[in-house]
Amino acid sequence: MQPLRARLLELEREMVESRTELVSAQRTIAQLSARVYELQALVERWREAVNDPEATLRKVRVIVSRSYRPPP
């Protein structure tokens, strides 16, 4: 029985480690999802500015300069 108990303890430790990794991965996924959402909104604003029939280089530059933030 002792080998089975030892293995059970190993599995329990592995389970705890896996849960910790899962929480970390979920945080990372949430951060990446938020970043994708921000970038989609940015692309949409720039696309609208560029595709506007009355777009000028100056107008587009203003929109880009107001909305662009360097990546963290």
Image (cartoon, rainbow, N blue to C red):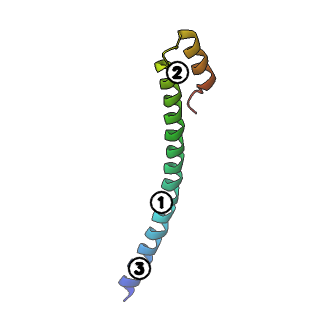
Residue nearest the observer in this picture, 58 or 32: 58
Q: CA distance from mark 2 to mark 3?
A: 61 Å
Vertical placement of residue 40 versus 25, above or below: above
**Quadrant of the image for the C terminus?**
top right
Query: Residue shown at 53%/10% (left/top)?
Result: 57
What amino acid type should be assigned to the residue bearing mark 3? Answer: Leu
Nearest to viewer (mark 2 / mark 3):
2
Percent across and percent down for residue 11 are 41, 73
Element assignment for label 2:
helix
Residue nearest the observer in this picture, 17 or 7: 17
Disc 2: which residue = 49
Q: CA distance from mark 2 to mark 1?
A: 40 Å
What amino acid type should be assigned to the residue bearing mark 2? Answer: Ala
User: What is the number of the mark on residue 22?
Assistant: 1
Disc 3: which residue = 8
Element assignment for label 3:
helix
Estimate how packed mark 1 is, as few (under 14), some (14 to 19) or many (20 or more) residues with alpha carbons within 10 Å. few
- Asked whether, in this view, residue 46 is left or right of residue 3, the answer is right
Looking at the rendered structure, the number of numbered marks drawn on it comes to: 3
Query: Residue shown at 53%/28% (left/top)?
Result: 45
Vertical placement of residue 54 versus 69, above or below: above
Q: Quadrant of residue 63?
A: top right
Estimate how packed mark 2 is, as few (under 14), some (14 to 19) or many (20 or more) residues with alpha carbons within 10 Å. many
